[in-house]
Amino acid sequence: MQGHSIGALSKRTGVKVTTIRYYEGRGLLPDPGRTGGGQRRYGDAELDRLSFIAHARQLGFDLDAIAELIALQEAPQAAHGDAHRIAKDRIIEVRDRIARLRRLEAELVRVVNACDGQSDGQPCRVLHALADHQACEGEH
């Protein structure tokens, strides 16, 4: 039986061996064929699938969305609208996270600016702010 070993697949895609096995368990990758010695062997289709999964993960798609996208790959005539919706949902998630990070940044800047980093006999304002969520100016 020809094909790629799990180690070779890992090297080619940058996905850890344990993660490849996890993806198999989740059904994102089909269970590969095995050699007579029980070694997993993967074909080019599995390599392409794993590359797709790895890229989607880099873009922040969760595994449920990736499973949907894989299913759409297998039925391309129905894919356009659903794939577009899934990608738009990811954009909304990214924008929400950016907004939360901006609020977090503003609060951290406020806390740091309230303290000059010098001991003047007063309690540290940074430590005070971290200990008392009520000291924050807004939700972050």
Image (cartoon, rainbow, N blue to C red):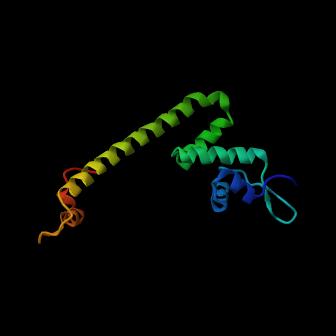
Q: Is residue 128 above or below residue 114?
A: below
| Residue reaching furthest to the bottom | 121
Place of residue 105 in the rendered image (x, y in percent of width and height, measured from the top left) = 30, 50
The image quadrant of residue 127 is: bottom left
Decide if residue 84 is on the left or right side of residue 44.
left
Q: Residue at x 18, y 63 (%)?
A: 125
The foreground one among 136 and 25 is: 136
Q: Residue at x 64, y 62 (%)?
A: 18
Figure disc tally:
0
Place of residue 108 in the rendered image (x, y in percent of width and height, measured from the top left) = 26, 54
The foreground one among 68 and 115 is: 115
Decide if residue 18 is on the left or right side of residue 62.
right
Place of residue 69 in the rendered image (x, y in percent of width and height, measured from the top left) = 60, 39
Decide if residue 111 is on the left or right side of residue 78.
left
Q: Residue at x 79, y 54 (%)?
A: 4
The foreground one among 120 and 100 is: 120
Decide if residue 44 is on the left or right side of residue 86.
right
Q: Is residue 130 above or below residue 83?
A: below
Place of residue 55 in the rendered image (x, y in percent of width and height, measured from the top left) = 60, 44
Quadrant, the N terminus: bottom right
Q: Is residue 66 above or below residue 33?
A: above
The image quadrant of residue 22 is: bottom right
